[in-house]
Image (tube, rainbow, N blue to C red):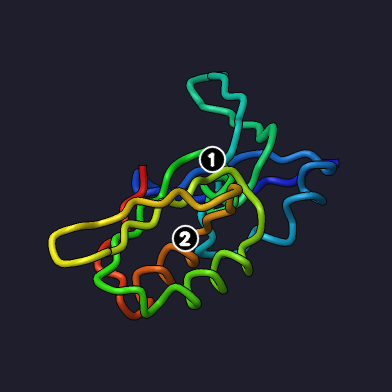
Amino acid sequence: KYAFLQMSDPGGVFECMMFADELARARPFLEPGVSLLMVVEADMRDDQMRIAVQSCSKLEDAIAGQARTCKVTMQNTQGLKDIKAILAAEGNGASNIVLIVPVKPGVQAEMVLPGRYRLSQSAISALHRVPGVQHVAEG
């Protein structure tokens, strides 16, 4: 009906209880080293904290689902096809993408791409590595 899970964060190791339905849903990503976003109910009993997990998701997925704007500043347009491929692989999401590209010396154009995109941490890292990308800023 439930399981006790041993978790850790920068503050140390702690134990929490997860009921069967949430455990079944979360099992695919309950692995060492995976960062999680958990909604918990906590209470003190007999000078001991009891933590019951209400919901659990991968932190990367939770971040990717947040509405935000990602500005990609480019030195040249060489990597536009690579950027398109990265965004296509990520699929639809909540984030706006703004490309800042040089038009002529001293002049830049700022373009908001149509649609909204999912932006995982791996996609943001991939954007940083695209040839011609000077800077990637999230906000």
Q: Residue at x 31, y 52 (%)?
A: 137
- Local packing at callout 2 (Cα closer than 10 Å; few below 14, some 14-19, many 20+) is some
Pick the front one: 101 or 39:
101
Is the residue under label 1 in contact with that under label 2 (CB below 8 Å)? no
Residue 136 at x, y percent in the picture: 32, 59
Q: What numbered label is drawn on residue 41? A: none
Q: Is residue 71 left or right of residue 24?
A: left
- N-terminal of the pair, mark 2 or mark 1, is 1
Please tell me whether residue 112 is drawn above or below residue 128 in the rendered image: above
Q: Quadrant of residue 99?
A: bottom left
Q: Is residue 134 left or right of residue 2?
A: left
Residue 132 at x, y percent in the picture: 30, 76
Q: Is residue 31 left or right of residue 19?
A: left
Q: Residue at x 53, y 19 (%)?
A: 44
* Quadrant position of the C terminus in the picture: top left
Pick the front one: 124 or 108:
108
Residue named by callout 1: 66
Q: As shown in the figure, which amino acid type bears the numbered disc 2?
A: Gln
Pick the front one: 10 or 118:
118
Describe the element under mark 2 as helix, strand or loop.
Answer: helix
Q: Is residue 21 left or right of residue 51?
A: right
Describe the element under mark 1 as helix, strand or loop.
Answer: loop
Q: As shown in the figure, which amino acid type bears the numbered disc 1?
A: Gln
Residue 36 at x, y percent in the picture: 55, 49
Q: What numbered label is drawn on residue 121? A: 2
Q: Residue at x 86, y 41 (%)?
A: 1
Q: Residue at x 60, y 48 (%)?
A: 115
